[in-house]
Image (spheres, rainbow, N blue to C red):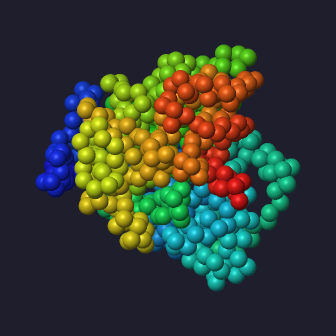
Amino acid sequence: MESPNQQPSDVQVPQENEHFVDLSEKRWLRHYPEKVRHTLEYPEINVAQFLIDAVTKYPKKSALLFMGKTMTYEELYTAADLLARGLGRLGVKKGDRVAIMLPNCPQAVISYYGVLLAGGIVVQTNPLYMERELKHQLNDSGAVALITLDMLQPRIARVRGENPDEGPVPKLRTVVITSIKDGLPFPKNMLYPIKQRMDGFKTKIPYGHDGYVSWKALQSRQALSFERPTLAGHEELAALQYTGGTTGTPKGVMLTHRNLVCNTLQSLEWCERIRLGEELYLSALPLFHVFGLTVLMNLSVCTGGCLVLLPKFEVQEVLRTIDKLKPTIFPGAPTMYIALIQAASKQAKPIDLSSIEICISGSAALPLEVQETFEKITNGKLIEGYGLTEASPVTHANPIWGNRKMGTIGVPFPDTEAAILSTETGQFLPPGEIGELVIRGPQVMKGYWNNPAATEAVFHEDWLRTGDLALMDEDGYFVIKERIKDMIIAGGFNIYPREIEEVLFEHPGIAEAAVVGVKDEYRGETVKAYIVLKDQVVVSEQQLNQWCRERLAAYKVPHIYVFRDALPKTMVGKVLKRQLIEEEEQNNE
């Protein structure tokens, strides 16, 4: 069978370039662990087939754990099937977009696979979105239905306006309302409404009017009388996954079933020692984020694992969950591991974290100090990987049980090619030179939804442009230097914030650090460091300045230090540097 990733390998740089770059050479392959295959065969299936296969093999095995409630694969499939039929009865057709606006809870997993079983396209929506963001995403995607929580209904009502049929989001015909209690065990499900009332929640939802439908109504056995549509094909869209909007208006990334199936199986191949039907996946990452969607939800179901669902990342709850339930796989973001390291050191009673065997860190650079310390307290493997929404998302990772290179994002996944493109000439660069990281492989998106101009701009021939500055070393390991837009140019020197952040993280008194470039009349830009100190630690600006001067060239040393209690972050723990820069600009107005 021909590899789905086979691409023409005759792309060459112009003859006048003094370096000849052989793009057919994949030097990273010789550093793959022995049992990891270089190329895979990918079944031409709908993502929902993962759940169909799992219920066939593991019907009575636990698929989800949520706040004391267990759901087996049989129960998960039944609920997803009922939802699919119920959506069909409400008029959702194959190819329709259905938005899911839920935190991590059983309904989020049921909804995801239910929409796919209904032939629909999933539009994952952040529950923290405000009206402006919701209007854009619902209108841009053309979502005909939304599945959300009762506590979020007032926000949805404001978005829809007084006359939903003619309001700001007219295509949104149906709003399915669930509650956290629908996923809780007895007696928590009985007590939860009391807690809601005590917290001031009094909204009365107008079921039967304006397209509002209760979750329980769609879980009715009456739905069995409605025939499910044919599953969408391998090359058809599975999801519109919106980018974070860090560089402007969020764009809908078109991910096909092929994209998501391939990336899930690539991830499985990389985690070569996963035990089918046995692993517990700790889900602290939000499932509505593409990282959680692939390396938690899809990978867990694909392997017959069990998802331990946490509605949000709370340090003490994560520590208690690891100590009690013994999860084995814990994908996360660096800020999560940093918080756990700090909290674990302060526990009055020892916390057992030794069940953790595999941690894949993504969303931001993983400081070496954090990696080494977390591995020491868990005895597991914490590796840095790399990905982006446009690639489903994972493209690179360090070998888990192989030749890891600290400070790198590792090597490309099976069937994935990566190269470095000159930002000045557009030519491919040899090892050791810095340029833009470009990628191609079966997990790369189809394009941006209704945005051909943006789609054209993000591709160089058939290579996806990542917007990240990087280099490839002689062994084929890749090092991310910085986002192109985040690179600081001070006095003519290119400065990479990540390098400075690594030095700051090595300081024993620093818990978190973020470095940005700010305007400077003399140098053009200058380096500003935002610092969060560890509890009960006092460090002066002069001490940090001395620390950096002993470890960095003078032009890289921060000129400004700002001490803060916390740094602004996304739901997956990525520091919002844009917000820091905007604050700086407002202060200077």
Q: Residue at x 59, y 52 (%)?
A: 521
Q: Foreground: 477 or 222?
A: 477
Q: Quick one: quadrant of the C terminus? A: bottom right
State the count of labels.
Answer: 0
Q: Foreground: 469 or 324?
A: 469
| Above or below, comparing residue 372 to residue 558 in the picture | above
Q: Foreground: 166 or 504?
A: 504
Q: Residue at x 43, y 34 (%)?
A: 384
| Above or below, comparing residue 172 to residue 309 in the picture | below
Q: Position of residue 588 (x, y in %)?
A: 70, 55
Q: Foreground: 274 or 572?
A: 572
In the image, taking residue 426 as reference, residue 486 lies left or right, namely: right
Q: Position of residue 88 (x, y in %)?
A: 50, 69
Q: Position of residue 431 (x, y in %)?
A: 26, 38
| Above or below, comparing residue 212 to residue 193 in the picture | below
Is residue 520 shown to the viewer in this render? yes
Quarter of the image for residue 215 reads bottom right
In the image, taking residue 46 as reference, residue 193 lies left or right, namely: right
| Above or below, comparing residue 154 to residue 511 in the picture | below
Quarter of the image for residue 302 reads top left
Q: Residue at x 85, y 54 (%)?
A: 200
Q: Position of residue 224 (x, y in %)?
A: 51, 63
In the image, taking residue 69 as reference, residue 6 lies left or right, namely: left
Which residue reaches farthest bottom?
166
